[in-house]
Image (tube, grey):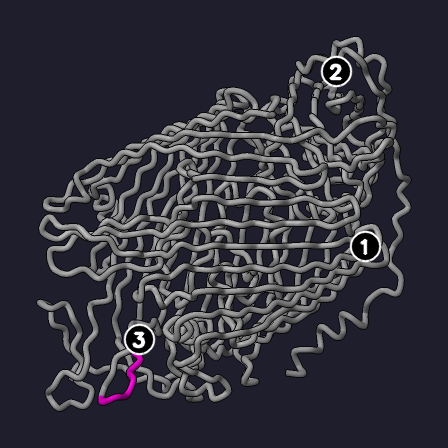
Amino acid sequence: MRKFLVLPLLLILSSALFAEKDDAEKRVYHAKRINPHPPIIDGLANDVVWQKVEWSGDFIQREPYEGKPPSQQTAFKIMYDDHNLYVLIRAFDDEPDKIERRVTRRDAFEGDWVEINIDSYFDHRTAFSFTLTAAGVKGDEAISDDGNNWDTNWDPIWYGKASVDDKGWLAEFRIPYSQLRFAQKDIHTWGIQVTRRFFRAQERSVWQFIPQKTGGWVSYFGELQGIKGIQPPRRIEVLPYSVADISRYQKEQGNPFADGQNSRYSGGLDAKIGLSSDLTLDVTVNPDFGQVEADPSEINLSAFETFFEEKRPFFIEGQNIMDFRLMGGDGGFSNDRLFYTRRIGSAPSYSPDLQDNEYLDQPDNSSISTALKLTGKTSNGWSIGILDAITEQENAVIALHGQQRKMAVEPMTNYFIGRVQKDFHDGNTSIGGMLTATNRNIKDDHLNFLNRSAYSGGFDLRHQWDNKTYSLDFRTAFSNIQGDAESITNAQESSARYFQRPDAGYLDFDPTRTSMSGHGGYLSFNKGGKSAVRYSVGGMWRSPGLELNDLGYMRQADRIMQYSWLGYRITEPFSIFRRLNINLNQWAGWNFGGETVFAGGNINGGGELKNYWQIWGGIGWEGMNLSTSSLRGGPAMKFPGQINQWYDLGTDSRKSLQFGFGGFNSWTQGTDTRYHNVRVSVSFRPGNAASIRLSPFLDINKDELQYIQESDMNGEARYLFGKIDQKTIGMTLRLNYSVTPTLSIQYYGQPFVSAGEYAAFKRITAPRADLYEHRYHEFTSTEISYDQQGEVYQIDENSDGQVDYSIEQPNFNFRQFRSNLIVRWEYIPGSTMYLVWSQSRTGFTSDGQFSFQRDLDRLFNVYPNNVFLIKISRWFSI
């Protein structure tokens, strides 16, 4: 283990004794109160009241030539009244006909734009960002963690217009105080930053100069002073909605649940209530997410669950406060977290076994009846996040000869998440904690495989010093699950731990247990700041009993990992580059038995060229891997090391026609196992209001040892593998057309085909043998035969003429098409109508032969499932 710690120790010992100090002068703007005639927000700024307010300008370039005067100057004015903050930004441009005015949906941030960031808490950690493009498209983000997190899912109600004239262009804002958060006091000082992107030069300039290498953002803002006599408003916003949809699909003869058509009518309510000037309560009753884009198609041949990003609005808005990740570098652990929002409202856990002539009607997801979310930050620095959600019991309906019965497939469940965090020393130090609870009301014995209760929690500490150049991060977690012995046995035997492994003497597998506990965490030391050289060293652990997957996400327990990263960046143009980054990574991991299970490293780098093209690439090495999951509960098995290589190239993003090309390649040493990925992207913008993006990809997976199944021979386990030749091809198509900034049409479509053919069947004989070829035995033609009628491979291991065990034909051809067409109209601010058409086609055969043309033809010959939906919501402010 010692040799893996040399680089981290060298990085720590090489730390600079003193970090560079930030000597940028703090700028101040004095806002002026207006009364009684506020400006009309039309983007023209011809109201007399604007003439009574002073301009502030002298912006400084931040990218690419840091500290230099910008190509075009910018100026702004700010005034206020009892209810709103008013901002006017003048973006000078001596060639106004070249201003890029792209009409897009909200939060696209395309073309020329200006934005103001407001730290109304004045906590030097959080801020609210309001952006307006030259086409009048709005964007908004909630900023947290001193600029490390920008949440584009925050959608406040505010007003903005833009116009172009012979001096350049103007952006006019009206921001209601109800959309900000501030304490009750007589005189306010807020942090502010004004930023401009000058699109055709890919240049950013700022009012308060903050160097790119500075370890922070909000903490370096200038100040907005002079705001007096305003009160935090009462905030009650209500958003009722109604939805209707109709589904059409292939009728199935004799199936009472598949008559070819279903219809549904529903309604619900979202509400946002300001409990105080600091705290906001979000409520959703019977939420509907029919307008949300479908997850991408996949074929998962691993032992682990796929992590999918959240797309439902209620759960993604303000999710930063609930983010408690147990990160420790890479190595497959970067998604581990205490709260994984996709657990709430997921697919039912149980699927009934059907008898002959039985038909099943099962819900796709658990219904969320009610969810509450309390978030905010108090004036004394406490950040608070609480979420509570209830999902109803879900029942499947089973029909047989005209008789129907119900069977529970998911119990009623309560989910609770609580998060607090406290800032000290102007945000340089923060401590916090998190607690989660999952409680299921299990009434049926066949659901006893689920945990009745699951609890997790953790503590986190972050400290920064020397002008935020250095930081120390510590985070720890615990878990406890309780339930029937069946559920705890399932947890012990899950792919996250495999306690039943015969060679894991340090693990205690107990099928009578009714509870299980564990712990985990990570520690890292980091150097950032203004220096061109940056690094991070750290480690993580997951005890064997740690279980987060009831409400969180965890790929594997029973791991200890050490990692280090060294980076070098150049942020100003030189040679052929506008900017350049080079990174060196190293990692190693062990199980709690003290065995090395993985080790590796890589070097990667790239950046933007002076012609505005982007390049990136890297090469990596993986050492011998001792896999505790490949035999799905069998003994650990050695796998040879790998060489990995990847690359990406993108053309000038300013152009109407853009191309991208990239790929990933992996070769396992001393074997024929290899993986190749090639992806291409083509983006075309035929005008300022439309865009087309086409992204085809091809995966080739040739694996000599792909797990198939476990069989039994005379009471002894047989772990059966085969050589797979898998080809996957797909394409993502996105079409966007914005009639106006508030009326848009979007299309998403993805055809997906994957075919896998197996050969060279094997059984594992000595999984830890020194030589790779000694770890398995490949069946000979006298040991294995194919029964074409039964579609099974029959294996006579001892050559006595009797079949000892068999393998069902594992070949597959999976075809799927998913698409969404969405018309979105924000007919008044905060109120939206959706028209949605979703289509899906799924087909499967087992010949394993890949033919792009044939598979594509077969895919579009599959009878489609079509869903047509209309959803209308209306925003009220009380």
Q: Amino acid at mark 3?
A: Phe
Q: Is residue 197 left or right of residue 251?
A: right
Cβ–Cβ under 8 Å for marks 1 and 3? no
In the image, the segment drawn in magenta is 714-720
* Quadrant placement of the C terminus: top right
Characterize the local packing of mark 3: few (<14), some (14-19) or many (20 or more) Cα atoms within 10 angstroms. many
Q: Looking at the image, is 814 positioned above or below residue 748?
A: below
Q: CA distance from mark 1 to mark 2?
A: 46 Å
Q: Looking at the image, is 655 positioned above or below residue 610?
A: above
Q: Looking at the image, is 183 positioned above or below residue 606?
A: above
Q: Check disc 2 and report the residue beneath it.
A: 167
Q: Check disc 3 and report the residue beneath it.
A: 721
Considering the numbered disc 2 on the image, is that residue within a helix, a strand or a loop?
A: loop
Q: Is residue 457 left or right of residue 96?
A: left
* Quadrant placement of the N terminus: bottom right
Q: Tell me residue 52's x, y (percent).
A: 85, 14
Q: Check disc 1 and report the residue beneath it.
A: 424
Considering the numbered disc 3 on the image, is that residue within a helix, a strand or a loop?
A: strand
Mark 1 or mark 3, which is nearer to you? 1
Which mark is drawn over residue 484?
none
Residue in the foreground of this view, choosing between 179 and 487: 487
State which tag comes first along the sequence, 1 or 3: 1
Q: CA distance from mark 2 to mark 3?
A: 70 Å
Q: Is residue 251 left or right of residue 138?
A: left
Residue in the foreground of this view, choosing between 407 and 819: 407
